[in-house]
Amino acid sequence: MEDSSINSFKEKLDKEYDWPSLYTFKFIVPKGKADEVRNLFSNHTTKEKASSNGNYISVTAEVMVQSSDKVIEFYIEANKVEGIIAL
């Protein structure tokens, strides 16, 4: 993520949420990569659903987050998973 897009996203988060707040993370990953996303949220409950063909898995986690900076940290870590799509 570029600094300008991170700053823009941070501003949007701060306008939308009062911190701390419950934030929903949603990702789509290729089959076999769900464990990597699940590990990002090891202290939180995740929900998973396979695509109709079974090639992809959607992973959703609701997390009580202290700040927009923490949300961004989760996305930066998630971006390291090969083939991930953040929704």
Image: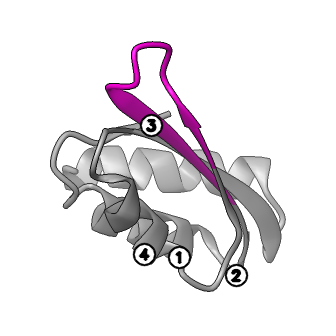
Residue behind mark 2: 66
Label 4, label 3: how far apart the Cα atoms are: 15 Å
* CB-based contact (under 8 Å), mark 2 and mark 3: no
* Between discs 1 and 4, the one toward the N terminus: 4
- Around disc 2, counting alpha carbons within 10 Å, would you say few (fewer than 14), some (14 to 19), or many (20 or more)? some
- Of badges 1 and 4, the one in the foreground is 4
Task: Name the amino acid, label 3.
Answer: Ile
The outermost residue toward the top is 52
> Image quadrant of residue 12?
top right
- Residue at disc 2, secondary structure: loop
Q: In whole angstroms, how far apart are the C-alphas of marks 1 and 3?
A: 24 Å
Please, what is the three-letter code of the amino acid marked with disc 1?
A: Lys
For the record, the magenta segment spans: 48-61
SS for dot 4: helix
From the viewer's side, name the closer residue of 26 and 66: 26
Q: CA distance from mark 1 to mark 4?
A: 16 Å
Q: Return the disc, 4 or 3, that comes first in the chain's sequence.
A: 4
Residue identified by numbered label 4: 39
Amino acid type of the residue that numbered disc 4 sits on in the rendered structure? Asn
Closer to the N terminus: mark 2 or mark 3? 3
C-beta proximity under 8 Å, tags 4 and 3:
no
Q: Position of residue 49 (x, y in %)?
A: 59, 36
Name the residue that disc number 1 marks: 70
58 over 74 or under it: above or below: above
The residue nearer to you, when weighing 48 against 76, is: 48
Callout in the foreground (2, 3): 3
